[in-house]
Amino acid sequence: MTWNGEARLAEQWGRVRARLQTEVGEVEYRTWLKQVSFAGLAGDEVVVMLPTRFLRDWVNKEYGDLIAAFWQQENPAVKRVEFRTGVPAAARPAAPDLAEPAPAQPALAPQRPETMAALDQRFTFETFVVGKPNEFAYACARRVAESPAMAGFNPLFLYGGVGLGKTHLMHAIAWELSTKPRGGRPVSVAYMSAERFMYRFINALRSQSTLEFKSELRSVDVLMIDDLQFLIGKDNTQEEFFHTFNALVDAGKQIVISADKSPSDLSGLEDRLRTRLGCGMVADLHATTFELRYSILDAKAQRAGVEVPPKVLEFLARKITSNNRELEGALNRLVAHANLFNRQVTIDTAHEVLHDVLKAHDRKISIQEIQKRVCEHYNIRIAEMSSARRARNIARPRQVAMYLAKQLTSKSLPDIGRHFGDRDHTTVMHAVSRITDLIAQDAAFAEDVELLKRLLEN
Ligand code: ADP
Ligand code: MG
């Protein structure tokens, strides 16, 4: 580990904090970020600490990306931010610049307009991997970035589960619009989370500057609000948003919204707002498929300049199915590990480094679940999974179930055998190799197994 010039780092941290403060506003900063302390730089990883586990997890989840982005802008050597629990020795009284953030320094960071949250440089159209589950949303996003406020695409409403790429697409639109102005005048874009919108609105109310707030928002060409579901139950803010929304649409400006559900499913939002949200283009990001996960991993590994064997990519794409954020996190960890120890990435290192992640995922698919699905699919009784019968129409599905258990869980061969009427681990091994062969030989069978796999994964 190399711990770099401490004074310089402390200074950079001061600026990162100052930017965080400006970015999220006073209330949010005091509630969550004030307690973050800087512990050092290890390799390309900044280590920060929080006094409790809850705070650590919360700040990591809510502000991890922002903190990392600001660090990267301060210090290009930083690739990741690691969140730990505790109070670093260096942050105790001796280091005053760590205790209080330095005042904002507009001279150092070009002052962003208040309406613009930091955009992640990695979130562009170029780095977005397109596949079946997201091609429609991607096409819509492209369209809006090309010609904002086109009929039929206003508002653009993107929705989907966590980590499927909503924020990535929104940043991509914002980058495209703000860096490639068309028709002489640059397009002014306001991008912020719904949470931020609320805090700004509340602050404006408090400081009696709602008029400024309103006119500022209404002066933009494109308004983008991320994670709109946050406004559920926040009636005043919803009301304000509704008026802003209408004013902008009436003035022919583009609105882009993201949320975790479709407008009609966002119960808790006012009806009139829901109706308006659904008036333009609604595009959803579906759960990822194996193919998309594989392509994303492949693209990210290439970008990181690390050779990851296809077998490992496949392994990760099969095992980590929840969302792209986790997938990316797993790959990053693997890559960091490989760099740190100067070792090649293999299935074994993947197992070792990602032990906890893989375990968490395993819990999601049980052998019982696999057996149930397989039996449903082949229309046989669940008891046959453990029975001694060897008729082909029973034995084959049983082998498929064993194969899937091997692929989708991290149970050992003897363990799997036990779930199938106490069969020996060699029987399981045989089943796995038999099914592997059949998949290679018989396309229809391969498709069948793939289908089962997907059903189980999603
Ligand atoms: P959401 O906002 O939907 O929760 P994000 O946009 O934050 O998800 O995506 C989570 C992570 O996964 C980001 O690092 C993002 O770059 C990455 N990601 C998601 N979808 C894709 C994709 N199609 N191609 C490349 N990276 C993706
Ligand atoms: Mg998001």
Image: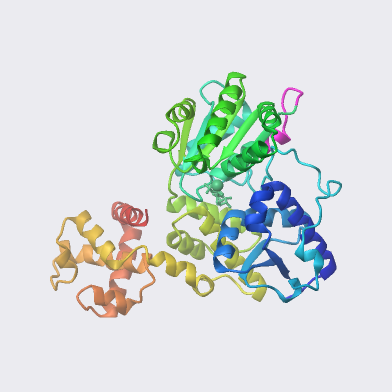
* Residue 104 in view: yes
Residue 302 location, x and y as percent? Answer: 62, 57
Please give the name of the residue rendered at 43% of the width and 50% of the height, measured from the top-left corner: 289
Display coloring = rainbow
| Residue 76 picture location, percent across and down | 76, 58
Residue 51 falls left or right of residue 181: left
Q: Nearer the viewer, residue 311 or 355?
A: 355
Find residue 112 and report its image quarter.
Answer: top right
Q: How many marks?
A: 0
Name the side, left or right, on which 445 lies relative to 272.
left
Residue 4 vs 424, above or below: the answer is: above
Which quarter of the figure has residue 193? top right
Whether residue 121 is visible here, answered yes or no, is no
Q: Is residue 340 above or below residue 220?
A: below
Near-viewer residue (110 or 22): 22
Please name the residue shown 46% across and 64% down the image: 315
| Viewer-side residue, 160 vs 11 | 11
Q: Is residue 332 magenta?
A: no
Where 105 sits versus 83, above or below? Answer: above
Tell me residue 108's x, y (percent): 84, 49
Asked if the stretch drawn in magenta spans residue 180, the answer is yes
Magenta-drawn segment:
175-185
Please give the name of the residue rendered at 67% of the width and 53% of the height, measured from the top-left corner.
29
As drawn, which residue projects farthest toward the right? 107
Q: Classify 408 as above or below 145.
A: below
Residue drawn at x 68%, y 28% is: 211
Seen in the image, is 3 located left or right of residue 174? right
- Which quadrant does the N terminus fall into? bottom right
Residue 19 placement (x, y as % from top left) = 74, 51
